[in-house]
Amino acid sequence: MSDNAFRAAKVLLLEHCPQHYQLLLDFCAELGLQALPRTAVNALAALAEHQDLAGVLLAEDLPGASPSGLGLAVAIHRQRPELPIFLRRVHTQPLAAAEAAAIKHDWQGPGTETLRAAVERSLYGLRYPPELVQGVLELTTRSIASMFPHAEVSHEAPYVVHDRIIFGEVSTLIALESTWCRGYMMLQTEESALRQGLLQGYGLAGVGGDLNFRELNNLLGETTNLIWGAFKNRYIPPEAFANQQTQVPIVINHQHKYMSFGSQDPQLCVRYLLTDPRRPGLPPLTIVQRLIFNLLWLPEKFTEYAAPQHDGASTGELELF
């Protein structure tokens, strides 16, 4: 296994000082962070636009924030308490109780040494071996292509998230369990986009867009099972079992499209895009995949168990029940 851990995440960048702005841009590039620059005026709107963030970089004296960046930090924390906020301080007075509760880490320039340590600890709390990330991309892409053979399947760059907001209306959940991991995999998509994709002929022969919501649920469920079968065949030996049997409640709030697995650890997220090569101008069908290793995660014991590839073995078709 490579010593290099997978590193990628999206962070909201709320900084106005030209010197620190460039410093933080370079800092993000070094740590694999995708910076999303915003102002105080559109910071909260950006939270609604991006529901897959890992954290926030905020200047205490950000112009336009009322009464200051600290007030904005409290507002962001109230709206998305899972997101760690890293505050660049310009004053020395102690933070009020509400402000201190909202801030994960505060730092003061000119160096970023303490900020780097805090980001490493908070945003990259779980280390994902690159071999595992690449393997998940490959087997998931093949599995989705098997279920949607007439679509062109691609994916965006994977990244880690701290947000717990559900994408779309249709979600599936399946357990992942081995000697080195224990948790869940989720697929999420929009019901209308899934139906439209079937109308465009993405699916298997005879599967159209006139399906009711139960049949659409089953379709995404079969896709999830196919991916699980491929994951099991490749990464979980037949005799594998998890040594730790701890369970935690899974909390779902449908009104706020929020789902929590009882852990503050980051989750691995990938967005897969299904497009019609005959109609390149149409919006893609997006399927969001999340891997949540909230019960057991031992990346140092991760081993790729894949046997020599045989026809059908790597796609997991035999795992459908």
Image (tube, rainbow, N blue to C red):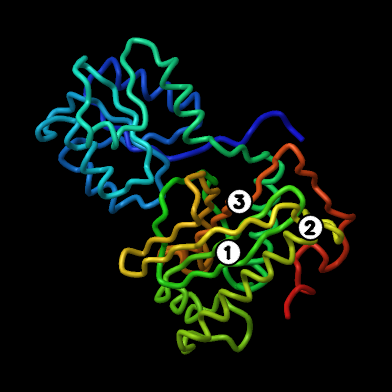
**Closest to the observer, 140 or 43:** 43
**Closest to the observer, 110 or 180:** 180
Q: Earlier in the sequence, mark 2 or mark 3?
A: 2
Give me the residue at 32% from left, 64% from top.
Answer: 256
The kind of residue tagged 1 is Glu
Q: Earlier in the sequence, mark 1 or mark 3?
A: 1
Q: Label 1: few (<14), some or many (≥20) within 10 Å? A: some
Q: Which residue is mark 2?
A: 241
Tell whether 226 sits left or right of 54.
right
Q: Label 3: few (<14), some or many (≥20) within 10 Å? A: many
* Above or below for 262 versus 58: below
- Give the CA distance from mark 2 to mark 3: 15 Å
For marks 2 and 3, give the one nearer the viewer. 2
The kind of residue tagged 3 is Phe
Q: Label 2: few (<14), some or many (≥20) within 10 Å? A: some
* Above or below for 113 versus 5: above
The kind of residue tagged 2 is Phe
For marks 1 and 3, give the one nearer the viewer. 3
The percent position of residue 186, horizontal first and vertical second, equals 55, 62
**Closest to the observer, 263 or 210:** 263
* Above or below for 127 versus 208: above
Q: Which residue is mark 1?
A: 152
Q: Which residue is mark 3?
A: 293
The percent position of residue 38, horizontal first and vertical second, equals 25, 37
Quadrant the N terminus occupies: top right
Give me the residue at 36% from left, 32% from top.
Answer: 104
